[in-house]
Image: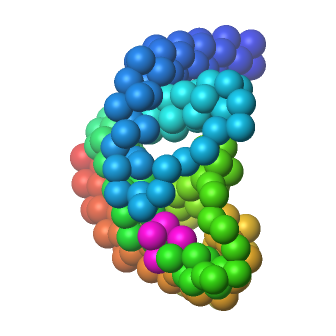
Amino acid sequence: MGVVEHLEELRKRLLITIGWFLVFLLAGFLYAGRIYSLLTAGLPFRLTVLGPSDVLWVYFALSGTAALAFTLPVAGLQCWLFVKPGLHANEQKAALSYIPFLFLLFAAGLLIGYFFVLPNIFHFLNLLGQGMFTEMYTVDKYFTFVFDLVVPFAACFDMPVIIMFLTSIGLIEPSLLRRVRRYAYFILVVVACCISPPDFVSHISVSIPLILLYECGVLLADVGYRRRLRRLERYEKA
């Protein structure tokens, strides 16, 4: 395929992904009320709206987040179909097996971020202002805080799978990951500081899981690298 054909194929894959995102967005919009009730069931206060546009914003924010989660497997499949012609048969099977884990790990990151990381950070911030302010949270401010913390945190949960995939197709090696470990730690801490509130406890609460995810990625990279070497040995013998 020439450059034009590659661009046409990429355009096709992007359009399919966007189309499925819009379908999931519509489905999420229809169930946004139930999602809102689920996410606010344990709150000790009622959220406030300052105008009709806040309600519409919440519907789009909730449905957009749900659509993003369910579009991940579709996006992964389209990426696999795009690079499939350049992979060997065994690499095609290996790459395809990673797609379900993209969705599962992203969903796990959403759950852990919302039910474990977020409550601890939120409780700490409330303790700082206890007895000083009258607490009244608007819908847009609360969910902006939630999504800015939880969604990037969940996206980082896909890091081990991405590292293992790149290792399995030979783009990176475990030795490289170990050499750049200190730089990776620094980048992850910066990311944690950007997606968490500006206090030390929040930074630590987010930084530690991200560093652990990187180390999990290094361990999985060793597994993927050994599998790749075995595949190359079988290929050479054949």
Q: Give the number of marks.
A: 0
Q: Is residue 105 above or below residue 186?
A: above
> Quadrant of the rendered structure where residue 193 is?
bottom right
> Quadrant of the rendered structure where residue 36 is?
top left
Left or right relative to 101: residue 24: right
Residue 20 falls within the magenta-colored stretch: no
Q: Is residue 82 above or below residue 146?
A: above
In percent of width and height, residue 228 lies at 36, 59
Quadrant where the image shows the N terminus: top right
In percent of width and height, residue 237 lies at 26, 54
Q: Nearer the viewer, residue 236 or 142?
A: 142
Q: Nearer the viewer, residue 13 or 189?
A: 189
Report the residue at 50% width, 76% height from top. Answer: 123
In percent of width and height, residue 26 lies at 48, 15
Range covered by the magenta-colored residues: 118-122
In percent of width and height, residue 127 lies at 57, 83
Q: Nearer the viewer, residue 145 or 172?
A: 145
Q: Main secondary structure of the magenta part?
A: helix
Report the residue at 57% width, 19% height from top. Answer: 18
Q: Is residue 20 visible?
A: no
Q: Is residue 134 visible?
A: yes
- In this figure, which colouring scheme has been used for the structure? rainbow
Left or right relative to 74: residue 192: right
Left or right relative to 115: residue 64: right
Q: Is residue 130 above or below residue 192?
A: below
Report the residue at 37% width, 63% height from top. Answer: 115
Report the residue at 42% width, 58% height from top. Answer: 43
> Quadrant of the rendered structure where residue 198 is?
bottom right
